Image: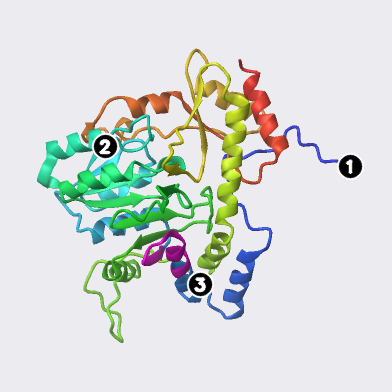
Amino acid sequence: MAENTSNKKIWLASPHMSDEGYEMQYVQEAFDTNWVAPLGPNVNEFEKELAAKVGSEHAAAMTSGTGAIHLALKAAGVGKGDIVFCPTLTFSATANPIIYQNATPVFIDSDYETWNMNPKALEAALEKYSYKVKAVLVVHLYGLSADMDKIMEICSRYNVIVIEDAAESLGAYYKGRHTGTFGEFGVFSFNGNKIITTSGGGMLVSDDEEKIKKVRFWSTQSRDAAMHYQHSELGFNYRMSNVVAGIGRGQLKILDQRVAKKKYIFEFYKRELGQLEGVDFMPINDWNEPNYWLSVMTLKGSLRPLDVIEALEKENIESRPVWKPMHMQPFFAEYDYVGGNVSEKLFENGVCLPSDTKMTDEDLERICRIIKELW
C-alpha cells in the first residue's frame, strides 16, 4: 500500500546522513579501535580535512560553534572593558560569547544588499568607539556572505581583529574564496540543523598555528604538560569527541551534494512563489556563491509571515521567522546599536521556508500550494 504523504511531517532543516554510509564507517572504526573517548584519529583527521576543504591552514574541533567563537575571542585577546562589534541580525550564539569574556557588545545593522553587517554602519561605529574596539564579529547569515572586501578594508584601517561566524555558511564562497577564511579566525557549526552535522559540534579555523594550538590547550581544560594534573590557566571542556568527529568526516564528503540540493530548493521556491504579489527572496549577488542553508522569503502587504507560518504549521510543516535582532532582545537591550531599521524590517517581514535536503519535489509542491492558497 502506498504511503499517505498528505500530512507527512516536513522539517525546516534536519540531519541528513549520507546514502553511502560514510559516517558509520568512521564511527565503526572508532568503536572497533576503542577510540570512543574524547580525541583520537577522527578528531585529528576531521580538523585536517575541514581545513583543507575551506583553504585554511589549521583547525580545532570543538563541542559547538559557540565554544569556537568564545575561544576565538579569547585568542584575540578580548577581555573586560573591550568592545566587540556584532551584527544585530543573528542568533544569540554569536553575541553570548562576548559576554562570557566580560566584554561589551555593540550591535551593527544590516543592509538590504547582503542581509549582513552594513559596512557604512560598521565604519560609523568605529568612528564612534575608535580605540576601544578589540574585534569585529562578522556573520554570514543563512549562508549569504557578507561584503568582506569592504569590511576587511575598514577593519584594517582601524586595526581591529576580524572573526567570522560562518556557522551557517560552510560551503559558501565570497569571490571564489570560502567564507570563514578572511578574518584571523573563522567558525563553523555542525549543529543538527546545519548543512552538515555531527549532531552537535563546531570548528575554529585560522592560519595562525600558535593560536590554534593555544585554543586546543584551553579547550582541554588547560592541562599543563606534567605527569600530575596541573593547570596554570583557566580551562574549558570544549573539545570534540572522536565518535562525533567520525560523523563529521563522513558528512564532509557529501557537503557539495548538500549545497547543490539547498540551491535547488531555493530556486524551486523562487520559481514557484517569486511572482506572487509582495514576495521577494534573500539577495544573491554576483560575487556571492551561497550555500543556501535556509531559503528565506520576505513579504510586503497585508499578508504577514505569521500567516504563512501558521498555514504551514496546520499542515505539519515547520517554518520560522527570521532571527529577531539582538538589540531587540531583552537581555541585550542595554547595549548600544548603530544603524537604521534594516534588520528590524527583515525580522518583521521575513519567513524561513522549509529547507530540508531530504525533501522531494512532491514535498516542495505541497509547500508552495499551501502558500499560494493564501493569496
Q: In this orientation, which residue lies closer to the viewer: 143 or 80?
A: 143
Q: Which mark is residue 119?
A: 2
Residue at which label 3 appears: 42
Residue 13 appears in the rendering? no
Which residue lies under the disc numbered 1?
Answer: 1
Q: Is residue 329 magenta?
A: no
Circles 1 and 2: CB distance less than 8 Å? no
Q: Is residue 52 covered in magenta?
A: yes
For the record, the magenta segment spans 48-61
**Toward the viewer: 72 or 253?**
253
- The image quarter containing residue 39 is bottom left
User: What is the secondary structure assignment of the residue under circle 3?
Assistant: helix
> Which numbered disc flags the more N-terminal residue, 2 or 3?
3
Question: From the viewer's perspective, is the residue at label 1 or at label 2 nearer?
Answer: 2
User: Looking at the picture, which amino acid does disc 1 mark?
Assistant: Met
Residue drawn where x is 31% and y is 66% of the image? 215
Q: Are marks 2 and 3 in contact (CB under 8 Å)?
A: no
